[in-house]
Image (tube, grey):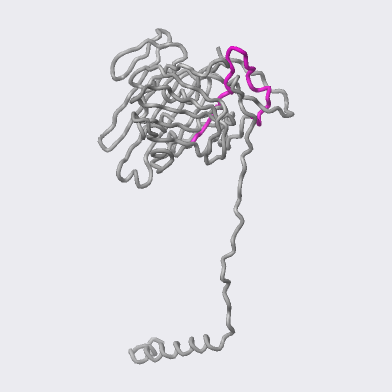
Amino acid sequence: MSLIFSTPTRRIALAIALSLLLHGLVLWLPHIKLPEHEVQLHSLTAKLVALPKVSGKTAAHKHKARPAPKPEPVVPSPSEQPVAASEVLAASEPVAASEPVAASAPLAASEPVAAEPAASAPVATAEEPQRPPLPKHAQLRFSIYQGQKNFKIGESLHTLNINDGHYTLKADVHTTGLVSVFKSYRMEQTSTGTATELALKPETFTEEITESSGKKTNRADFDWANHTIHFSGGGDATLPLQAQDILSILYQFPPMRPQEEIVSINISTGKRLETYRFEIAFEEPLETAMGTLQTVHFRKLHAPKEEGLEIWFAQEYRLLPAKMRHIDRDGKIDAEAIITDIRVSDD
């Protein structure tokens, strides 16, 4: 068989014969008309129905009752340094993204709190509305934008685990996409301490920032017995009651009393202890990738030429953080971290 195509002349003759055959097929075969338009598939949509709003006269989260077996009674438990534009999420993602949550079962997409039996919520008092119970395990993902959702520069993942009266809360923030090519940045924050169903009490807060220029670490140790907080960079400070670190405050919002619209919070940034004063708006809708969420909005009061911070807590999701915003010294929005996914487990 190889002898048939052994010379260039024979190969050329075969090519001509094949060409004639193809042209004949094109001329004599029936005309086949191809569809002019591609079939369009129906898009899938999901709608998030807002739950009953929290009244401005009380910050307690209202639960929608439904028939359910009688739950076990809930037992009540007994500044930040301005965040840099690339850090707003960490004070917020998380992402030791490769680090699994230590839940006994896979985390499920969080359902609004109102889906739980109303009896499971602590009873609000006139003096201090109770917080919703914290999930034992949680994963929250955020997208980080430069300016007011203008350009995505990074992502963040938060993980919360509560076991045997102790908690570990981690936040990993890092640049992504084209930004990471020009500026590689990663911030890992960890807060650990004791926990009840309703409260976090930090014992240690660490922050590691890794850039092309190197790595730097800040650490704060909370000595509750001696009412002192120690900083790795040197120096101590008196530790007031209800103090939190810049990460735990996102999951341990301060007591809110019906007659108050401004609260003061003592927050450690890992370098120092500061007192922040936040103005509160109780019923504010927030557009997210998860739909429109009803939020409680905390806005830090700050003087001109001083950096600001804002935090939105989702009412439908146990008042977990849904958005963080950093304001620069000129009063402009420097960066925003906006929730894209919430998953919780109580197992």
Quadrant housing residue 75: top right
Q: Between 288 and 306, which is closer to the camera in this rendering?
A: 306
Q: What residue appears at the point 44 percent right and 16 percent down from the top-left corner?
A: 243
Q: Nearer the viewer, residue 127 or 19?
A: 127
Most foreground residue, 1 or 338: 338
Question: For residue 164: magenta?
Answer: no
Considering the image in quadrants, where does the N terminus appear? bottom left
**Numbered range of the magenta stretch:** 114-140
Instruction: Looking at this view, name the residue that lies furthest to the top.
Output: 226
Image spot of residue 33 (x, y percent): 58, 77
Q: Residue at x 30, y 44 (%)?
A: 182
Magenta highlight on residue 138? yes
Spot occupied by residue 122 in the image (x, y as percentages of width and height): 63, 19
Q: Position of residue 77 (x, y in %)?
A: 56, 14
Q: Is residue 116 above or below residue 131?
A: below
Which quadrant would the C terminus be assigned to in this image? top right
Q: Which secondary structure dominates the residues rendered in magenta?
A: loop
Q: Is residue 326 left or right of residue 256?
A: left
Of all residues, the one furthest to the left in this rendering is 213
- Identify the residue at image location x=31%, y=19%: 232
The quarter holding residue 81 reads top left
Q: Is residue 315 shown above or below 176?
A: above
Side of 319 where 202 appears, left or right: left
For image coordinates 54% across by 27% down, the residue present is 296
Horizontal side, residue 142 vs residue 215: left or right:
right
Q: Is residue 3 above or below residue 295?
A: below
Where residue 330 appears, as percent x and y from the top left, is 34, 30
Residue 120 lies in what quarter of the image?
top right
